[in-house]
Structures are given as structure tokens and as C-alpha cells.
Amino acid sequence: MSDPIILCKDVHKWYGNFQALKGVSMEVQKGEVIVIFGPSGSGKSTFIRTINRLEEHQKGTIIVDGIELTHDVRNIAAIRSEIGMVFQQFNLFPHLSVLQNVTLAPIWVRKWPKDKAEQVAHDLLERVGIPEQAEKYPGQLSGGQQQRVAIARALAMQPKIMLFDEPTSALDPEMIKEVLDVMTELAKTGMTMLVVTHEMSFARAVAHRMYFFDAGQVVESGTPDEVFKNPQEDRTKLFLSQILTH
Amino acid sequence: MTAPSIPTTEKPPVASVGVLGWLRQNLFSSVANSLLTLISAAFLMFFGQAVLTWAFTQANWGAVTGNLQVLTWGRYPESQVWRLGVSVLILLVLGGLTWWLWRRGAESPARRGLLFGWAVSPVALTILIHGITLPTPATISNNFGYYLFRPDVLPLLEESWRGGAACIVIGLLGGLTWGYLQGRRRVLGLVACGLILLFLLPLGLQSEPWFFGVQVPILLPMAIDLLLATLVGNAAGRSLSNFEGLRRWLPWIWGLTLLLVVILLTTFDVGVARVAPVETLPIVSPNIWSGIMLTLLLAVVSIVASFPIGVLLALGRRSKLPIVRGFCILFIEVVRGVPLITILFMAQVMLPLFLPLEISIDRVVRAMAGMTLFTAAYLAEIVRGGLQAVRNEQVEAARALGLSEVLVTVLIVLPQALRAVIPPIMGQFVSIFKDTSLVAIVGLLDLLAVGQSVIKQREYLGAVREIYLFAGLFYFVVSYAMSVASRRLEVQLGVVDS
């Protein structure tokens, strides 16, 4: 096995006195799709947010693409430009058009000329299935369309890793599929993906490995087959039975 | 079963539409409302008749028409008034083009040109209205001759600020170049600045009373100016290092800066010079600016200058650096805790105490400074409200894309924050426009002060109503125009939001 693209070892995180992460370790190889699931408040969002340092961990090591996350600002900027992130609430910039949302970071961070950035943006919007919305503003789009723009925005930086923080939780049921389809396509291209989600059909179809989080710890991990068919821990069994009966 | 019938459309009752319907709904909907309508109508007729009768039969409008000139540009020299006309024309053209381009909404090179036009307009208008002395080959060679060969006879005490100003300009330029460029060229820039500074050395050897009357070589304040300016310039250059466009502008910036240094150093009478400088555009001292012209200048300057200061104060108040935050909080709270009139008096009386003796800032400029700082403090609080309204998720999304903190603020946070607070910002601007009338109390001749002096003329004695009505109308028209503009701006930007 080659060096992992993400290496987390014994990661701890506190909010004041509350301990959100209690020693999480994870190795992710290039091209792997990891699904992270677990009850709310289990620290899964906090964990993937430590990987691009939207949250700082206080103990343990995180090494992304060979760079260790420290307090060094240059370090953080370098890592963030290699990691795309998609949020639950889309978080598109409402004062910019769809095209401007997608080209903003390539122009200002990657220093691409505007023409090149717009070319890439149009290609990406085509890929996520909304080429005709480029001149509209986020507020004029449906939730599913907004989330697909958010994916295009993250991909425009040509990241090595994509983080998805509950990308379908804020969507109406009929829009979940269009976003999951885009994510499935992306996984097929060999993108390294960390996905926090409760979409178990997506996990079964796409994930290489799954991690079950509870109370700030990794309770269980394995391939989808192992986790779904033969969960080892009681907590995993209970949680799976709760979400799969719905 | 019968098929569900679609109700046929009926005409609305006659009395609910049209003029009659409107009257019935709005003015005579009940007995009380009808009574109110009748009383109001009677009052309006009585009052309106009185005003109209006065305006057309008794009023002496000669007090206004006969003094229109003194009310508008006051004591600005008759032969130079064309400069005010050109200034207004420049603003109208810039404003008109902006409006036209905005309506078209398309990206175009014209937009960049327009931005440049707005950027240089403050300097251009200042020169136009205030006047300027440009160097001629004769004064340049004459003055530079003294710098190089006879620095001992330069009687610089009156004009030593020019040395400091030159240092600031060169420091900014050198710092900017050093921070922005890389490799050999930035060394070259630094060497060039060093050479120019050598040239200033003779100036610096003069000494003058500084703090507490101690004789100090001017070199000392000049060095401090230079150091601070270099630091500021360097910081600006580094934060702009991502901005490729500056590379093309850099030669222009260098050229203009050098021109400015030459102007600073060669356009004053060195006293022993055989060639006296000639005013290219005759200087009209701010001391004699008055009337509507002064009112508008005070308002425009304090509005334009206070905006960036207010934004910086608002950002500073949210800074993580305790000294920056502390200073901003102190400034904002102190200024907001003091009435404007007090600040105007302070600016007139106290400011000279803090400045070296030789620098006598003009009274009008002092009033502008006071009003600018006052408005900036209020704007800072308004903008801070807008900053708080921007959701933290926006900041996180921008950070996750790899944008630096400066870019996050400039590209994501500020545009959203400012858009949210257009109405209160415009309210503050309207308020400061009307508050310019307070400068009459510290002895400046704004529209109201000129009006009061007109009333004291013998032939217009007692024309109080006419003058005040005229002034009131002027303030109303401008204020109303500002609030209409604000609403249009909101609508334009609001479309984006929906």
C-alpha cells in the first residue's frame, strides 16, 4: 500500500469542556470513497471539518497529502486549496452569479486568467447538469441545483480530496437523487471522497469503506458489506436498525 | 352527478373601482374618516391660500434672485467661476456614464475606464477648485540648483512640511514596489527611491523647533514619516501581490509619484530664488469658499472620505488584535459620545495644538476633517451591524476554497455586509449633509451663514422668510434626491438577492 493521502492519528477536539472527538484515527488511500455515518452529535461533521482545518484539533496528528496541519497559515492555505468541501446548507455566495461563484477561487487563489477559469466553470456546470444556469444567482435556483453548483465550485479548484458534510440533508426528497447522481459520477472518476451522509443506498453502491461514529469515537469500520450484513457492535446494530427501517 | 361548475367572472361593484371607488375607500370609508378628510381639506385650503398669497403678492424674491451669486459660490473670484462649472460638469458626466453603463449591465472596458475616472476625480476636482502651482523648467532648475549647491540658504521653516510629504510619498512608493515585485526589479526600485532620498538630505539638515520647542533637524520627522510610509506601502504591496493588474500600472504609479515629488519640491518660493513660481491655476484659498458651494463641498468630502474610514473602523473593531480593536472602540465611542458641534469646535481650536507651528491647516479643511471623523464613527457602527448579519457559513465556505482572510473579507463579507446596510448608510449621509449647516457656528460661511448675512443687507432687510425658504428648499431637494438614489440602489441590488 502506498502512503495514505489522509492520515489521522488519535485526533482529539474539545469545545470548551465538551469533548467532541475522542481519539479518532483514520487512513484514507488515494481514490477511496469513505462514508461516515452516525447519530447527530457524534462528531462526524466536526471530524471532516478538522481535515481542512475549519475546526482546529487540539491533540493528535492530521497529515493531508504529506503536509501536517499546524498553526502555520501558509500550510493551511496550501491544504485548503487541495481540498474541496460541500456543505449541508450549500453556502453559495448570494451576491455572486453561479458563474462567479465557481470562478472566484480559481481566479483569486489559483491565479488563472478569467477566460480559462470561465471555460473550466462552464465545463463543470455541464458536468453537474446545469449549464444553462450560469448567469443566474443562487437565490433563483432550487436546492438541488444550488448543491450541484456548490459541487462544481469545489471541483473548480481541481482538488485532490472532496469532503461532503451531509450534502443531501437539507434537500427535498425529489432533489436528493440528482445530487447523489453527481456524487456517484464523481466517485467513478477516482476522486478521493469523504462523505458524511445517512443515504445508505449511496453508501452501499459507492463507498469503499464505512465508519460508524458515536460519541466522538469510531465505533466500527469496514466495507459496506461487512457493516450492513454483519455489524459487530451493538451500537452499530441499533443505529442501522433505526435508520434502515425508515 | 353534475360536473363541477366553474364560477363565472363578475364585474366588480361600480363603486369599488375608479376615482369614485378610490375616494370612497380612502377618504370617506367611515363617518370619522369623512370628518377628518373635510377638516384636513379646510386646513390645507386655508394654509395653502395664505402661503400662495404671500409668495405671489408680498414676498420680496429679490432677496434670493438678487443674491443668487453670493448664495451659490459666495466669494469665489468671478473670473475663476468657470472652474466650478467644469467641476460640476465632470461629476455629471461621470455620474451619467455610470448610470448608463449600470443599466446596460454588460462587462466592458469602458467600465474599467470609468472606475479610473472616479478614482482620480477627487484629486482632479481638488486641483480644479483649489488651484495649483505647477513647476516650470525655470523653477525646477532654479530650486534644484539650491538643493544641490546651496542648501544652507534654503529658508525652509515655512515649507518644511514639503520634505515630510515627499518622504511619505517616496516611502509609500518604495514600500509598495518592494512588497509587490520580486527579484532584481524590486532591488532596483529600492535603489531608485534611495537616490531620490539622498536628494532630500540637504532639506533634512535644516533644524526647526519640534516638540516643546526643542530644535531638531528636520531629518528626524522626515525619517519617521519615511519609515511609517514604507511599512504601510510594503503591507499594501504584499497584500496586492496576487493582483496581476498592478504590474501594468506600476510604471504609471512611479511616473505620477515622481511628478508629485517634483511638484512638492519646486513649486514654492525658496526665498532667495530668482525665479518665483507662477500659479498655473490661480489658488483660491478655502478661506473664501462659501455659500452652496461650501455646503456641497463639506458634505461631499465628509461623505466620500468617511466611508472608507468607517469601514476600516468597523473591521478594526472586530479584529483579533487587542490594540487595533481597543483603538477602534475608543475612537468610535468617544466620537459618538460627543455632539458634532463640539467636534467642530475642537477641530477649530484643539487641532492646532497637536500640530507643529508651521502647519496651519485651513479652517475649512479642519471642519471637513471634523465632520469626516464624526461620520466615520457612526458609519463604523452601521457597517458593524452589516458585518454581523453575514452568516459565518459564508466565511467558512470561502475559507474552505483556500481564500486568504483578506480576500474573504473583501470578496465575500464586505459586499454582503454593505448591501444589507445601504438604507442606514444613506440616512447617515443625508444627516451629515444637513448637519453641514452647523459650521456657521464656528464662523464658516455656508449657505445658511451667507443667507443670514444677506438678510442684513439694507435693501433686503426683513426678507427672512424668502431666504430661509430658499435654503430649506435647497436642503430638501438634495436630501430627497439622495434618498431616491438610495432606493434605486436598493432595488437594483435587491433583484440580485431574491
Image (cartoon, rainbow, N blue to C red):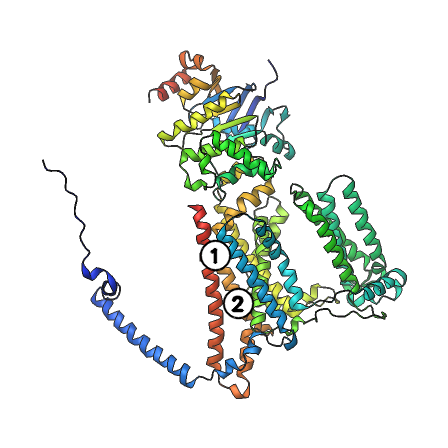
* Amino acid type indicated by mark 1: Pro
Q: Is residue A57 visible?
A: no
Q: Position of residue B27 (x, y in %)?
A: 26, 66
Q: Tell me what residue is drawn at x 75 percent, y 67 percent.
A: B358
What is the CA distance from the residue labelled 2 to the residue labelled 1? Answer: 16 Å
Q: Position of residue B93 (x, y in %)?
A: 56, 61
Marking on residue B424: 1
- Mark 1 lies on a secondary structure that is helix
How many numbered discs?
A: 2
- The image shows residue A102, relative to residue B138, as above or below, that is above
> Is the N terminus of chain A in the top left, top right, bottom left or bottom right quadrant?
top right
Q: Is residue B405 visible?
A: yes
Horizontal arrangement in the rendering, residue A137 relative to residue B350 (left or right): left
Compare residues A176 and B425 and report the one nearer the observer. Answer: A176
Q: Chain of mark 2?
A: B
Marking on residue B435: 2
Mark 2 neighbour density, 10 Å: few (under 14) some (14–19) many (20 or more): some
Q: Position of residue B491 (x, y in %)?
A: 43, 53
Compare residues B482 and A135 and report the one nearer the observer. Answer: A135
Q: Quadrant of residue A243?
A: top left
Q: Tell me what residue is drawn at x 55 percent, y 35 percent.
A: A119
Mark 1 neighbour density, 10 Å: few (under 14) some (14–19) many (20 or more): some
Going from N to C along the chain, the mark reached first, 2 or 1, is: 1
* Amino acid type indicated by mark 2: Asp
